[in-house]
Image (cartoon, grey):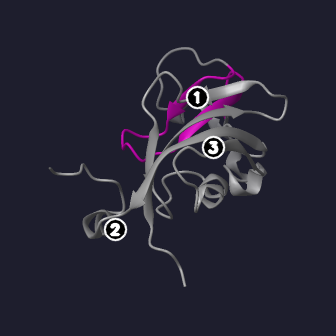
Amino acid sequence: MNSPARIVSFHYTLRNPEGRVLDTSRGGDPIVYLEGAGMVIDGLDEALRGASPGDKGMVHVPAAKGYGERDPGQVQAVPRDRIPVEGELKIGDQFQTAPDPGAPVVTVVEVDEHSVTLDANHPMAGVDLSFEVEVLNARPATEQELTAGKPLPIED
């Protein structure tokens, strides 16, 4: 029998395989999410199931359970005149492919006079990740949160 989904809040520090800090919530607001709703990467969601407030530790997430493996099919050359960005483009530049907030973000990996090669893979695709986590709170999700698929403010 599955336990009911919970709302979990935690702080994290994310490191790449070389130990370099990539991101942290320390010094800011914790992450608050609904278990199983896709709000955090699968490997982290799975590792925090059943965690209690005060739990601390390292969570190692393989690329396949993080941002996925790199897909060479997500890299392609596009004619320069089809790029929705004005001005000079440099390797490493990132932009959204359309004005829609859900449009993919791509990274420029090569530029020549006629085309721009874009990579639509997530920048952390193919990277095994390590999260240092501290669980701050965990409580059962309300029916409204389960329906909404996300944490909601608790009314007094």
* Element on which disc 1 rests: strand
Contact flag, marks 2 and 1 (Cβ < 8 Å): no
Between marks 2 and 1, how big is the CA–CA gap?
27 Å
Identify the residue at image location x=78%, y=46%. Answer: 126
Contact flag, marks 1 and 3 (Cβ < 8 Å): no
Left or right? Give the position of 88 relative to 7.
Answer: right
Q: Residues within 10 Å of mark 2 (few under 14, many from 20)?
A: some
* Element on which disc 2 rests: helix
Instruction: Please say if 30 is above or below 28.
Output: below
Q: Residues within 10 Å of mark 1 (few under 14, many from 20)?
A: some
User: What span is colored magenta in the figure?
Assistant: 91-117
The image quadrant of residue 121 is: top right
| Residue farthest to the right, as pictured | 18
The residue lying toward the viewer, choosing from 1 and 107, is 1
Identify the residue at image location x=53%, y=26%. Answer: 26
Q: Which residue is mark 1?
A: 24
- Type of residue at label 3? Ala
Q: Which residue is mark 2?
A: 146
Q: Earlier in the sequence, mark 2 or mark 1?
A: 1
- Type of residue at label 2? Leu
Image location of residue 69, percent across then percent down: 76, 52
Q: Nearer the viewer, mark 3 or mark 2?
A: 2
Image location of residue 53, percent across then percent down: 51, 48
Left or right? Give the position of 77 relative to 106.
Answer: right
Q: Which residue is mark 3?
A: 120
Left or right? Give the position of 45 relative to 73.
Answer: left
Identify the residue at image location x=57%, y=14%. Answer: 88
The image quadrant of residue 148 is: bottom left
Between marks 3 and 2, how big is the CA–CA gap?
31 Å
- Verify whether residue 105 appears in magenta: yes
* Element on which disc 3 rests: loop
